Image (cartoon, grey):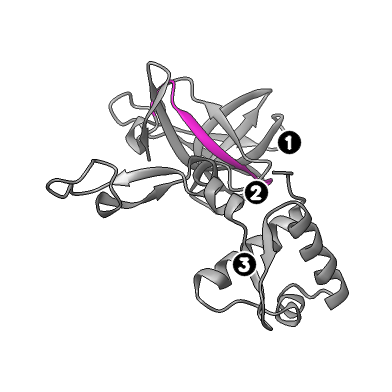
Amino acid sequence: MEPLTEKQRLLLEFIEERLQAGNPPTQREIARHFGLAQNSVYQLICYLKKKGYLLSSAGHRCLRLSDEYLEGKRGIPIVGRVAAGQPLLAEENIEGFLDLNRQFAGRRDAFLLRVVGDSMVDEGIMDGDLVAVEPAETVENGAIAVVLLDGEATVKRVYIQRDRLALKSANRAAGYGTRYVKRNEKDVRIIGRVTGCLRLYHGLPARVT
């Protein structure tokens, strides 16, 4: 399927949320929600249909998600209790689906960063893990984020103070402290917020946190 622009992605997410709630939106409601002209909403919906994400059905509230889009979102089955006499992946045994792409890259510009070092092990982030990063120039205080410091990326819990950043490690056993970096003394900037962690064993995904 063709990639979406940021506006198209936001519109699709809104429509999907409303459909999941059993309340399909009208074009007028979409326009009101985003502060757009109804003609602009019509054009965006046309693009979503052309790219294969949406379909029309009869009625005033006529939008629905395409089978191709839903199939791509379905993800890996999560198996709960196995019913006696049923195959492992029988519908009765499946609690839901985990879409790794949606989990780790809900935004088109999201990326995975490999962690080097043990400074965040108390947060469950180990050396060699992959962290999912949602790009952002600032984050809420106390968020785990990726910071670029003198050209090197580091993962820390970040506290934004007046003229400096406090970069807090999470490894009590190693005794790592909090590092304070003044903005005017170092080439420092926030790259994005960490939204998840993926651990690999022998090249295969083994754990999601």
In this view, the residue in front, 107 or 152, is 107
User: In 3D space, how far apart are the residues under numbered discs 1 and 3 (Cα atoms)?
Assistant: 51 Å
x, y percentage for residue 168?
Answer: 46, 37
Residue sitting at x 53%, y 49%? 71
User: In 3D space, how far apart are the residues under numbered discs 2 and 1 (Cα atoms)?
Assistant: 17 Å
Magenta-drawn segment: 126-137
The residue identified by callout 3 is: 64
Residue at disc 3, secondary structure: strand
Marks 1, 3: nearer the viewer? 3
| Label 1 CA crowd tier, 10 Å (few <14, some 14–19, many 20+) | few
The residue identified by callout 2 is: 138
Marks 2, 3: nearer the viewer? 3
x, y percentage for residue 107?
Answer: 64, 47
Q: Amino acid at mark 1?
A: Asn
| Label 3 CA crowd tier, 10 Å (few <14, some 14–19, many 20+) | some
Residue sitting at x 28%, y 47%? 90
Residue at disc 2, secondary structure: loop
In this view, the residue in front, 156 or 131, is 131
Q: Amino acid at mark 3?
A: Arg
User: In 3D space, how far apart are the residues under numbered discs 2 and 3 (Cα atoms)?
Assistant: 35 Å
The residue identified by callout 1 is: 184
Residue 135's place in the image compared with 22, above or below, is above
x, y percentage for residue 192?
Answer: 62, 41
Disc with the residue nearer the chain's start (2 vs 1) = 2
x, y percentage for residue 198?
Answer: 43, 32
Residue sitting at x 73%, y 36%? 184
